[in-house]
Image: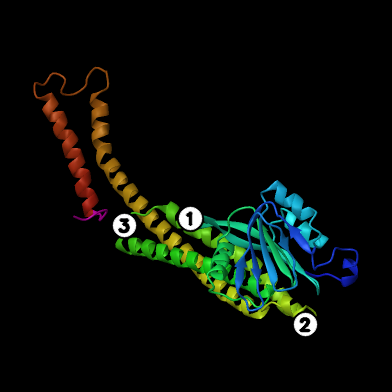
Amino acid sequence: MSIQQVDDGAQRDAPSAEGPPNFGIIPGLVWAFRIHVDGTAEPLPFDQPIDNRPEGWLWIHLNLSSTAATQWLANSGLPKAGIATMLSRDRHQQLHATNSFIHGVIADLEQGLDGIGDYVGHLRFIMTDRFLVSGRHRNLAAVETARVAIESGGHRLSHAASLLELIVEQVADGIDRVADDLATELDGVENRIADGLALERSQLARVRRTTVRLHRQLSGLRAVFHRLERRGSDDLKPALQLAASRLAQRLDDLDHSVLELRERGRRLQEEMSVMMAEETNRHLYVLSILTTLLLPPTLITGIFGMNTKGLPLTETESGFLIAMGLVIGASVAVYLLMRRIGVFKL
């Protein structure tokens, strides 16, 4: 995870951050919007060229799993550093800023058919004051939610940075919803422990594993925006200036909640381990008593089972009954002795 300010001198030979005047028909396009001056979003068709006209700005979202999309991106005329970020397989969250464009990688929860999943994907983007080109390899929850929000008119975006802020906020909202679900699961585990009911250790292990994954995602994202906050954004164009302080504070609070869930899960797992140890000790205690009670009868049957001459009761008609009486009497005697010394009480 990193944030880096790139010297303008290093960008002199790079393609213009304004991008080409016409993007053309884009292969691997997931969706595209033209954001007008009033902040309203207009969906653009897939099968028609997209022009980079001066009015408003564009959001172009690509499927980076498409070879045609990556080939288009490599020859798009966008800044080389941003293209390298888009085409890389680097999974570290990062943000690289110049005063003409920003590019980076942000982690997001994957979107499945049954809602937000536990696995983390990555959104890659290049942002100027004229467009935001983003891409992903798998469906991402926050990006999809942001698309629905602007398409329905729920959010009006004044500039490109406001779109990136909206996506980061949706990332935080998605993690918050997952954290709420985890808290509910922990409540159920806690109730079962309090009632002394049997528990599936795999459920608690999954909750703890998810909190670790969420904390790792949040810590990387927090670090990126804290570094941007310390660096400042006065040298960036107004359309590229992110509300780093507000986003960092939101992520800090959310990460604190996730850490509390992780610690709560750890305590519950320790309590469950103690309960299981107590149950095991009880079983061993019962087994030890049974072994002690059966040891004298085992000794007697062993003696009478020896194939030697001179064994007692071999010529006695009631020898078997006497031997059984000795077996039972030995067990009773051991039982009474154990009660007297306080091994167990009835």
Task: Say whether disc 2 or disc 3 marks the residue closer to the N-terminus.
Answer: 3
Amino acid identity at mark 2: Asp
* Label 1 crowd bin: few (<14), some (14–19), many (20+), radius 10 Å: few
- Circle nearer the viewer, 3 or 1: 1
Q: Would you say residue 321 sits in the magenta stretch?
A: no
Residue at the spot 71% in from the left edge and 55% down from the top edge = 25
Q: Which residue is mark 2?
A: 234
Q: Which residue is mark 3?
A: 197
- Asked if the residues shown at circle 3 and circle 1 are in contact, with their CB atoms under 8 angstroms apart, the answer is no
Q: Does 149 appear above or below 312?
A: below
Q: CA distance from mark 3 to mark 1?
A: 19 Å
- Circle nearer the viewer, 2 or 3: 2
Q: Which residue is mark 1?
A: 206
Q: CA distance from mark 2 to mark 3?
A: 59 Å
How far across and down, in percent of the image, does residue 197 sit? 31, 57
Q: Secondary structure at mark 2?
A: loop
- Asked if the residues shown at circle 1 and circle 2 are in contact, with their CB atoms under 8 angstroms apart, the answer is no
Residue at the spot 27% in from the left edge and 18% down from the top edge = 307
Q: Secondary structure at mark 1?
A: helix
Q: Which stretch appears magenta?
A: 341-346
Amino acid identity at mark 3: Leu
* Residue 93 in sight from this viewpoint: no
Q: Is residue 82 left or right of residue 110?
A: right
Q: Is residue 304 left or right of residue 158?
A: left
Q: Nearer the viewer, residue 103 or 44?
A: 44
